[in-house]
Image (cartoon, grey):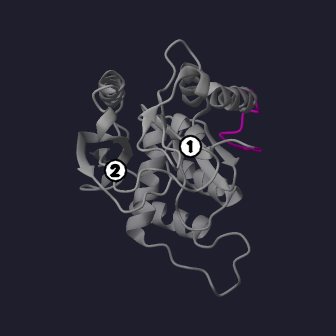
Amino acid sequence: MAPGPVAVPLLVAAAREALGAGPGARPGRRRRLPAARALQAAGEVLAVAAGLKPALLWDCGAAGPAELRRYLGRLREAGLAPGRLHVLAVGGSALVLRPGPALRRVGAALGARPVPLVDVSAGRRGPALCAPEQARAVRRHLSALLGHLRDAQAAGPEPVTASEIVPGDWNLCTVAGVLLGYPAVYTFAQGAENCLALTPLRVFTARASCPRIKDGLSVQIYSFSVPESLCAQLSDVLDAWGQELREAFSAQSDFVDLCISSEVVSLPAVAL
């Protein structure tokens, strides 16, 4: 039986009270979070709680880990996402995750079939799959993340926990891509530049409706890109990602009408 619906006003109020202003905001400067964005935020958290993806990179204004943790507590009070959730602060960003699935995802990335890494370093003629020896640094970083997540999972029984990891020389784009469940992730030499400008990219998007929150609410569950030139080489992992998502979707009752689509785009600049 599907869980009962959650009152929309409670979700909007929770988001506005917990996330309406970032750390250090001046009194009287509280920005009112739009109701539509508040419902999207709740839907994205619910996608993690429902097991549709291992983690969510938080993107809702200037809210920091403390505000985010308070917000997740309010969602639980409203009857949404009853399982344990964890806020991971890393390199100025915050991710929402379930420790167990996140651990399995990072462990799998370190296993016999690691996540393919796509080198998009500036100066390359085009993106290319990394050789195993190029992935050694990333594997060290993922091993450190795995240990941190194990500690987080073993923490106290609180329903919403939080921790921070100092990334050092990590490539956050790469580590976050693994944790977010992408079937292939970008990596590049340190710096902000990459070689993806005007490169045809196939953008995969997964969306689903969430009547648990509101009839007609469409929630984006995944959005990532893969260089079109590498799609044939990556077809097995892309197919496996789609199959795993469909299986996870069939095992939950919060979302309906899963839609996985893709399109090819070329952009003058690509930020990672």
Neighbour tally class for label 2: few under 14, some 14-19, many 20 plus, Cα within 10 Å: some
User: Does residue 51 appear in this view?
Assistant: no
Q: Nearer the viewer, residue 94 or 159?
A: 94
User: Is 158 above or below relative to 218?
Assistant: above
* Quadrant assignment for the N terminus: top left
In the rendered image, residue 27, in percent from the top left (x then y), is placed at 70, 84
> Residue 79: in sight, yes or no?
yes
Q: Quadrant of residue 230?
A: top left
Decide whether residue 162 is among the magenta residues: yes
Q: Residue at x 36, y 31 (%)?
A: 252
Dot 2 lies on which element?
loop
Nearer-the-camera pick, 125 or 110: 125
Left or right: where 127 falls relative to 180:
left
Q: Earlier in the sequence, mark 2 or mark 1?
A: 1
* Residue at position x 63%, y 43% in the image: 171
Residue 199 marker: 2
Range of the magenta residues?
153-168
Residue 14, how many percent across, how many down? 54, 63
x, y (%) of residue 66? 71, 57
Q: Is residue 245 above or below residue 226?
A: above
Q: Amino acid at mark 1?
A: Phe
Residue 226 placed where, x, y %?
36, 40
Three-letter amino acid code of the residue under disc 2: Thr
Residue at horizontal 61 percent and vertical 67 percent from the top: 62
Question: Mark 2 to mark 1: distance in Å?
Answer: 15 Å
Q: Crowding near pointer 1: few (<14 within 10 Å), some, many (20+)?
A: many
Left/right of residue 18 with respect to residue 184 in the rendered view:
right
Q: Which residue is mark 1?
A: 188
243 left or right of 26? Answer: left
**Magenta-colored stretch includes residue 192:** no
Q: Residue furthest bottom?
A: 28
